[in-house]
Amino acid sequence: MKKLLLGNEAVARGLYEAGCGFVSSYPGTPSTEITESAAKYDEIYAEWAPNEKVAMESAFGASLSGTRSFCGMKHVGLNVAADPLFTLSYTGVNAGMIIAVADDAGMHSSQNEQDSRHYAIAAKLPMFEPSDSAEALAFTKLAYEISEEYDTPVLMKMCTRVAHSQSVVELGERQEVGRKPYEKNVMKWVMMPAMAKKRHPIVEERTRKLVAFAETSDVNRIEDGSDHSIGIITSSTSYQYVKEVCGDRYPVLKLGMINPLPEQKIRDFAKLVDKLIVVEELDQIIETHCRNLGLEVCGKEIFPLIDEFSQNLVAEKLGQRKHEGKKLDETLPARPPVMCAGCPHRGLFYTLKKLNLTVLGDIGCYTLGAAAPLSAMDTTICMGASVSGIHGYNKASNEVNAGKTVAVIGDSTFMHSGVTGLINIAYNESNSTVIVLDNSITGMTGHQQNPTTGINLKGDPAGKINLEKLCESIGIPSIRVIDPYNLKECEEVIKEELGKDCPSVIISRRPCALLKYVKHPGPIAVNREKCVGCKSCMRVGCPAVSMKDGKAVIDNTLCTGCRVCTQLCKVNAIG
Amino acid sequence: METKNIMIVGVGGQGTLLASKLLGRLLLTRNYDIKVSEVHGMSQRGGSVVTYVRYGDKVYSPIIDKGEADFILSFELLEAARAAEWLNPDGILITNTQQINPMPVITGAMAYPEDLLGKLNELGLKVDALDALTLAQEAGSSKAVNLVLLGRLSNYFHDFTEDEWMAAIEQSVPAKFLEMNKKAFHLGRTA
């Protein structure tokens, strides 16, 4: 049966067809739908883990138990899971194990543009790189075979344009693979120095064998062309752009396995053509490999190291005709993403701005609090960095600014890696104020459950971590809960906690306005006779509020009736 | 058949993803190669959103580049202006006349550009504009703007019958909203 599937859905289908029985992941754009789709198959146990390291180690445990396993994450998630990654390369697997990592060239929804292929090289692990959904499905099934045959976890590298593009796939049947027995083997599973020293040569030997596979497997294929003046080595979406522009004109070496790379196959391809060009997004991985083989090659001399590619970019760089359109001769206002109307983060960030605080921020929808007009965030680095960062900021400055500084972090991000930073605050006793923005969901990635919501990935009731009790047990002396729709309460409590000479946590609690179960009071309106046009209500940056003919107006298709703007109106014109 | 390109643009939350999903289902009933490229994540929060739908004998790139779109289906006027450069010389820009203020306009940093329709026509583009929001409300919900616009697009797709469109709609929307969505499609098709 033919079906249109997202690249991510196709990976999930591959997991299903290959008999995968265990999936553990942390959501992250553009990887999230792999795990969400896998959860729809009854045959697969699937869960959200608190973070990527936990997910990968759980997937390892599942593999150890003899079940084919999977974990998925975005590129920066692999940084979190890098610790188990490097040593799982040494232990290898029992049942097959796949780790999917989705890069985000162009940074559609990410804080950096790192190239995850470096991890495959550094950890000495095989990495497949599909260029469409059909390959995503096929490579996932192949990856389990490689994983078991070569005794290694296998990396599956996705990118935004493969993960979030639907293309046609042919569905197959599920193949039940059964459970492999677990056998105690300290030389394989216990990585103390004496054992690890014996495993490292096995890893190197495995890479040699995988190179031999890369030489002969048709995952790396040569597509001949009519004009041998140029030969192009490429992979992933770059392959699609090359074919879009050049069709069958130039020979193409299309790499489906990006680590380890073949040697003889590349040399043979080089002999076919006059000039070798490598087309790859982000870093020069294939290009460097070719140079190490002593081949003359053109790559990043002409192609950029930054941003994602497109057919016009490839056409231009290869000296082909690119398409052009007609453009209006004026600067159009940008339309950046904004906090939604009714977003519970809005009132809290308004208060932080009003109090003129230094705000160490974190990763989530609330990072939008950095944008005008709220402009209430000073830093954003990675998951959890707000809580760890405020500790260092306060300690190193003898806490002179502790009364003017807060950390803000979402509920899911706090569970991911904020809690360890909070333990440091409690243990090493810094006078830090941490605000947990508890909107009862993982918002930015599209509403995934997390350990604080009491519901699991399959939608069933689950364990529920109580934030107040957690903070209390860590030893935080002052814990307060506020409603971010109540500006007066927000301001008073934040001031009180900043004034205390001890660590404190403020939980700003209100579910995401987009959650289906949240009932809104409904739109409110501006009394145009009372409105004096002072624009006080505009200071919260709500997309539902704007000015028309000198008076405020509220868009009744967007307004939820949160009444944050009502509290800002000095003449009681909104209600 | 040469690859055809349909670009769908709008504001996060307007239902552009349903439109591309429905088109994908419709095209899958023929033996086309198809690619539908979406953007998830941060940009969905009220930002500009773009979806690419491509079909033909063999489709390589998942995206549509500047100067390549045969059709642009725009849910909002400013987004139509932003996307205009993606239209090919013979392409048709179908746009909702609805205006949604972006944050720089809301904060007063910039003004919403005036007479965008006139300017787009002056560029020599083929523009087919309609008030999809009013038609959607007439059908029963402001959320049905996507079906109104698909109805309009269907006028240019002579290969597909109304029955085939209806089948794709039935597969794509919840049963309780089916009649309302069909009505919205019909209003767009006949407006």
Image: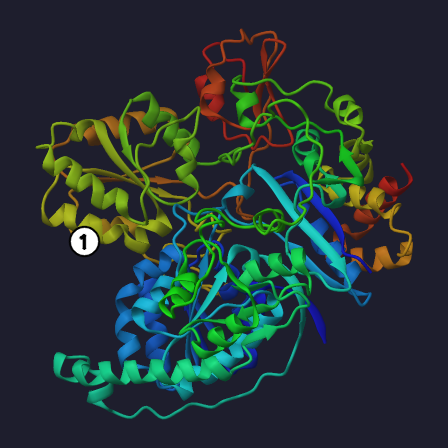
Look at 45% across and 11% down and name the residue there.
A570
Query: Whole-percent x and y of residue A230?
Result: 58, 62
Q: Is residue A55 at least partly visible in the picture? A: no
Amino acid beneath label 1: Ser
Q: How many marks?
A: 1
Query: Whole-percent x and y of residue A566?
Result: 49, 20
Query: Whole-percent x and y of residue A190?
Result: 20, 82
Query: Whole-percent x and y of residue A521?
Result: 56, 33
Look at 58% across and 71% down and name the residue there.
A135
Q: Is residue A321 above or below residue B32?
A: above
Q: Is residue A428 left or right of residue B152?
A: left
Would you call the spot at circle 1 few (<14 residues within 10 Å), some (14-19), or many (20 or more)? few
Q: Using the image as rendered, state which of residue A496 and residue B22 is in the foreground.
A: B22
Look at 44% across and 26% down and name the residue there.
A372
Q: Chain of mark 1?
A: A
| Rendered-image quadrant of the C terminus of chain B | top right
The residue under label 1 is A473
| Rendered-image quadrant of the N terminus of chain B | bottom right
The residue tagged with tag 1: helix, strand or loop?
A: helix
Q: Is residue A200 above or below residue B7?
A: below
Tell me which corner region of the image, top left, top right, bottom left or bottom right, holds residue B171.
Answer: bottom right
Q: Using the image as rendered, state which of residue B166 and residue A513 is in the foreground.
A: B166
Look at 34% across and 50% down and name the residue there.
A413
Q: Using the image as rendered, state which of residue A526 and residue A283 is in the foreground.
A: A283
Q: Is residue B64 left or right of residue A259?
A: right
Q: Is residue B54 above or below residue A254?
A: above
Q: Is residue A392 at least partly visible in the picture? A: yes
